[in-house]
């Protein structure tokens, strides 16, 4: 915190709700840490800009190459049956994450998949990184955002959840789950299928099929024309472009060690 004061960035952090106590881990994180860019006030956005944040990097947009219809790159290695996994991947999955043949081949069985990447312990996170996962791909493809709180959904992400019939009450188990939860993929409407795709589901995973029943060693990623709210687009071309920020403070060494961890996911859903 003293370095932040020395570099004269302290006002930006204070405007985002940080105090010396919260920065040092002795108090709760500020409310802005759980906000999407669109939920920040104008003053908070101005403070974030002063710390070299803009909408895409504040929302942790996934910048990895992705030519699929899904919001994040498909981790093909996770859809390889247990007996076909390379030995090193199997060892890591078993020792760090507690997988065995049954829990690997049946998605959603391993208790780790019920949690977000950032809420797993360090051994589990390191194991996931070793076999090829990162925050976005784990939270979307494995957890499908089921461990997220309702107020963390925003914008296009929230649209996808609501398209599948969820409300704040049903998400918080205060009402029954929507009918889509007991409907097979073929019975979903085109809009519901498009929404499920944005949660990283495809037909076989939506239907909870075992990996060995649909594994293809040479998969071809499909494209999909979807119409949402009257706007038709090829989802494979939905990309987020980074905005260049010109700010001399961004090159300062203090920012090499400052990370504001925002545990949220982001959808590309147009």
Image (tube, helix red, strand yellow):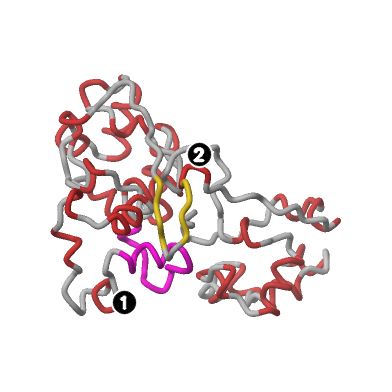
Q: Residue at x 63, y 79 (%)?
A: 41
User: Could you tell me which secondary element the residue under label 2 belongs to?
Assistant: loop
Badge 1: how crowded within 10 Å, few (<14), some, or many (20+)? few
Give the camera-side residue of 12 and 65: 65
**Residue 229 vertical position relative to residue 94 in the rendered view, above or below:** below
Q: Which residue is mark 2?
A: 66
Q: Is residue 153 left or right of residue 91?
A: right
Q: Residue at x 86, y 56 (%)?
A: 248
View extreme (right): residue: 248
Tell me how far mark 2 sits from mark 1, CA to CA. Answer: 31 Å
Task: Describe residue 171's horizontal placement relative to residue 59 as left or right.
Answer: left
Q: Is residue 183 left or right of residue 197?
A: left
**Nearer the viewer's eye, disc 2 or disc 1?**
2
Residue 149 part of the magenta segment:
yes
Decide whether the magenta segment is chiefly helix, strand or loop: helix
Q: Which residues are magenta?
A: 145-163
* Residue visible at 57% across and 71% down in the picture: 38
Tell me where residue 89 appears, x and y as whole percent.
34, 26
Residue 168's tag is 1
User: Front-most of 195 and 191?
Assistant: 191
Q: In terms of sequence position, does the residue under pointer 2 or pointer 1 come before the other?
A: 2
User: Residue 199 location, x and y as percent?
Assistant: 35, 53
């Amino acid at each position: 915190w003293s370095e932040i004061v020395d570099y004269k960035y302290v006002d930006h952090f204070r405007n985002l709700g940080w105090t010396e106590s919260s920065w040092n881990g002795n108090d709760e994180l500020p409310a802005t840490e759980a906000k999407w860019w669109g939920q920040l006030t104008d003053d908070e956005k101005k403070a974030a800009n002063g710390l070299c944040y803009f909408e895409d990097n504040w929302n942790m947009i996934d910048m990895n190459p992705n030519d699929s219809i899904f919001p994040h790159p498909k981790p093909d290695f996770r859809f390889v049956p247990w007996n076909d996994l390379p030995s090193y991947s199997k060892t890591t999955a078993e020792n760090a994450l507690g997988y065995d043949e049954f829990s690997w081949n049946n998605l959603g069985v391993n208790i780790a998949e019920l949690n977000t990447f950032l809420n797993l312990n360090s051994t589990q996170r390191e194991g996931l990184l070793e076999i090829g996962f990162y925050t976005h791909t784990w939270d979307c493809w494995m957890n499908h955002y089921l461990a997220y709180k309702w107020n963390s959904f925003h914008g296009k992400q929230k649209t996808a959840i609501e398209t599948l019939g969820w409300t704040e009450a049903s998400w918080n188990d205060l009402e029954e789950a929507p009918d889509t939860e007991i409907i097979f993929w073929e019975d979903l409407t085109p809009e519901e299928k498009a929404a499920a795709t944005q949660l990283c589901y495809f037909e076989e995973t939506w239907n909870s099929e075992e990996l060995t029943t649909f594994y293809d060693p040479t998969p071809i990623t499909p494209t999909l024309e979807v119409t949402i709210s009257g706007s038709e687009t090829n989802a494979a071309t939905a990309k987020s472009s980074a905005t260049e920020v010109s700010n001399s403070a961004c090159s300062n060494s203090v920012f090499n060690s400052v990370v504001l961890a925002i545990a949220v996911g982001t959808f590309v859903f147009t």
